[in-house]
Amino acid sequence: MKPLLVILKSIGVILLGFVVIVLVNSPHDLIINTVSKGTAKNNVPAGTQAELISIGIVFLAGVFATIVVYILGGQQRKKLLVILVILFLLADLTGVFTSLAGTSLFYRIVIIVIIPLEVWVGFLAGKKLKPA
């Protein structure tokens, strides 16, 4: 029974991490369009300034999700963070090849490349907030 509970808790923690990503990314278009009118529609930035703001928002979402997974992960923290990196990579690759295909190559590359940095910064912040 205990392994089943560990698996269910792990799935719940990962899902909660993705809920955090959705919550942080929800004002994405509003923030970008406030700074530069009409440059973001359906979470797709248009223009260099909008892309840079979007990169910042995506980075923060990944960091906050990593902090949540680290703090709630318990003994499975490191395994869950590896799973989180893989899921981030899959989600971002899907986005890069579908909805973000019309953006600049720089933006699409940076979105993929910052994944390890997001998780590393989130891991360090989580470690500061809740030492093991």
Image (cartoon, rainbow, N blue to C red):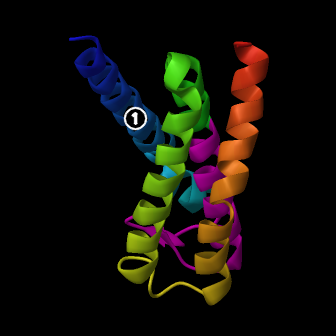
- Badge 1 crowding class, 10 Å Cα cut-off, few under 14, some 14 to 19, many 20 or more, is many
What residue do we see at 30% from left, 26% from top? 7
Relative vertical location of residue 54 with respect to residue 131 in this rendering, above or below? below
Quadrant housing residue 126? top right
Quadrant housing residue 14? top left
6 falls in the magenta region: no
Q: Position of residue 128 (x, y in %)?
A: 79, 19
**Secondary structure beneath disc 1?**
helix
Q: Position of residue 8 (x, y in %)?
A: 27, 24
Relative vertical location of residue 72 with respect to residue 51 in this rendering, above or below? above
Quadrant housing residue 120? top right
What residue do we see at 47% from left, 46% from top? 83
**For mark 1, what is the residue?**
14
Amino acid of disc 1:
Ile
Residue 43 can be seen, yes or no: no
What residue do we see at 29% from left, 19% from top? 3
Q: Position of residue 131 (x, y in %)?
A: 74, 13
Q: Position of residue 10 (x, y in %)?
A: 37, 27
